[in-house]
Amino acid sequence: SDHQLEYPLSPGDMEWKLLYPAFYDESTGLMTKQVTIADIGCGFGGLLVDLSPQFPDKLILGMEIRVQVTNYVEDRIIALRANNAETSAYQNISVLRGNAMKFLPNFFHKAQLEKMFFCFPDPHFKQRKHKARIITNTLLSEYAYVLKEGGVVYTITDVEDLHNWMKKHLEEHPLFERLSSQWEEQDACVQIMRNATEEGKKVARKQGDKFIACFKRLPTPTII
Ligand code: SAM
């Protein structure tokens, strides 16, 4: 249960300086950057760690619902920062405990995000549990709200049924359009997400399949 989770009333109430102290300007009292990349259900943080050097000028946030797992990722980032103090590496990644299926617009402004990752989400195999899946019509509208036009939703899973489910819902949603397999082949993040996460490594060890689908956030149609 997540009833004791705390949420900011609005994105402006978030204390981002606690998560990314290197990107806080003491003189203005403002952050010099805002989060533009989110890893939803980040697990043990492998994707954050591998994305960090790829996007040194972007703030990357993992969101994870399990307390112990979030604490683990927090410690992992503290250690990485301490071991790389002279280069300031890993200052751009952080983790937040939260339920990404609730109140996402409390954390992010409209059109704030450039990329959202859904790596090996919980499959919820049973039919009656499908509504608990992290991609549904309603949630996609929230993801579309926090994503900017041209922003990208990345999905990867080893469960073909879940892949078809995510693809179907994204294809049916008016604000998303599938990116081509050529686009996927040349995108650096697709290459990283294939192997960076702990779940992805487990699947590779078992020589399982990895199904990928990426979608672009379309412009919101203007109502005449
Ligand atoms: N993305 C990681 C990877 O590829 O290694 C973790 C995959 S794991 C199968 C799914 C993760 O999503 C778990 O760590 C779980 O706690 C987290 N999760 C499930 N529902 C969530 C939610 N509503 N909000 C945030 N995290 C969630």
Image (cartoon, rainbow, N blue to C red):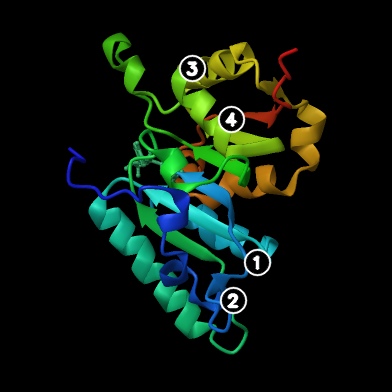
Decide if residue 91 is in sight here.
Answer: no
Query: Could you say whether the residue bearing mark 1 is in a helix, strand or loop?
Result: helix
Query: Could you say whether the residue bearing mark 3 is in a helix, strand or loop?
Result: helix
Q: According to the image, label 2 marks what residue?
A: 89
Q: CA distance from mark 2 to mark 3?
A: 37 Å
Q: Nearer the viewer, residue 77 or 30?
A: 30
Q: Earlier in the sequence, mark 2 or mark 1?
A: 1
Q: Which mark is residue 144?
A: 4
Q: According to the image, label 3 marks what residue?
A: 137
Is the C-beta separation of discs 1 and 4 under 8 Å? Answer: no
Name above or below for residue 215 compared with residue 62.
above
Q: Mark 3: few, some, or many residues within 10 Å (few <14, many ≥20)? A: some
Is the C-beta separation of discs 1 and 3 under 8 Å? Answer: no
The residue sitting at 54% across, 15% down in the picture is 169
Q: Earlier in the sequence, mark 1 or mark 4?
A: 1
Ligand 1 quadrant in view: top left
Q: Which mark is residue 38?
A: none
- The amino acid beneath tag 4 is Ala
Closer to us: mark 2 or mark 3? 3
Q: Quadrant of the N terminus?
A: top left
Q: Position of residue 22 (x, y in %)?
A: 54, 78
**Which residue extends farthest bottom?**
86
Q: Which mark is residue 53?
A: 1
Q: CA distance from mark 1 to mark 4?
A: 26 Å
Q: CA distance from mark 2 to mark 4?
A: 30 Å
The residue sitting at 65% across, 61% down in the picture is 58
- The amino acid beneath tag 3 is Asn
Query: Could you say whether the residue bearing mark 4 is in a helix, strand or loop?
Result: helix
- The amino acid beneath tag 2 is Ala
Q: Quadrant of residue 164?
A: top right
- The amino acid beneath tag 1 is Pro
